[in-house]
Amino acid sequence: MMLMVSVQNLAEAREAVNGNADIVDVKNLDEIFIGANYPPVIKEVREAFPKERHVSVTLGSVPEAVGTVALAVYGAAALNATSVKVGFVNMSYETALRTLKESKKALKGFDTKLIAATFADSHLYKGIDPKLVVKLAKESDSDGVLIDTLTKDGRNLFDFMDEGTLKGLTDEAKDLGMSTALSGALKISNFDTLVRINPDIVGVRGAVCKGEDRYKGRVDAKAVAKVKSELDMRVEGEIEVFNEAK
Amino acid sequence: MLIDATKKNCKGVITELEKAMAELKEGDNIETIVYGVPNRMDVYAWARRKGHTIEKEQRSGANFRITVIKGPKTS
């Protein structure tokens, strides 16, 4: 299970890597909901680390503008992002699917992977049912899925979707050969459940920021290392999270 | 056939097992080494879902060597 840390700039990316994060995910918290960061920032972060270090790019909740999004996806690929995440809120399923299909076409010739993202709290924003993420990814030939949250008021992923539902979606995506990621104000106290679900990637930000404040705090290497260690202890069985033997 | 899935990867062991199993005949077996308890649990759950049989398992630290037979147990 890989630890993905959301960062806003190179300084935070260095903290994340120093704390042993597997993936740095470049995003922009100043834009509505979650948005993309500026190309020079992404370029700077990408060039600071070897290619083996995963640097992903979040486009966030994208607008209903298929060509514009496809061009942004192309931009992420041209910047050598390991993956690019395209999320949908207030949009029809058909438009989201068309956006992903055009984004996939835009990635032709690049190694960058396309990740379809929905939000567990989508219903609060008249958005797409998050449970459709695997269908959306399958029909668009996306490489992976992410379920995140938009609400940043203290509630998190598990306030909106339960373990069984998330486990079902994760297993379904894995069976189809997709990568799977879960995010959304996750904390160490959620790790037992997360490890039972076993997504390929767990995304955090607030939990690794000073003061656990995702907006005012900054990513801190010590906090990243602590979170990584807590995750690894559960993965390696030092902390038991499964009730049954098999 | 042995699938060493201990190296970290975005796509997990199930993808590799699915691909490898498709090449096998019923009754053939495959060995995989997975890192971590949740991946081990995933292999067991996947085998249950797909109707395969776990024949044996050996643990070494956080790595699990698991033998899976394609199809149901015959004896």
Image (cartoon, coloured by chain):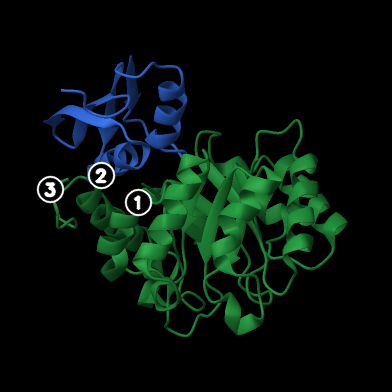
Chain colours: A green, B blue
| Badge 1: chain ID | A
x and y percent of residue B53 in the render? Answer: 25, 30
Label 1: state its secondary structure.
loop
Q: Residues within 10 Å of mark 3 (few under 14, many from 20)?
A: few
Image quadrant where residue A158 sits? bottom left
- Disc 3 residue type? Ala
Give the residue pinned by disc 2: B41
Q: Secondary structure at mark 3?
A: loop
| Amino acid type indicated by mark 1 | Asn
Which residue corresponds to mark 1?
Answer: A198
Q: CA distance from mark 3 to mark 1?
A: 16 Å
Q: Tell me: A203 left or right of A128.
A: left
* Chain on which label 3 sits: A
Vertical relation: A192 (above or below) A246: below
Q: Count of labels shown?
A: 3
- Asked if residue A168 is positioned above or below residue B14 in the image, the reply reads below
Image point (59%, 80%), residue name: A123
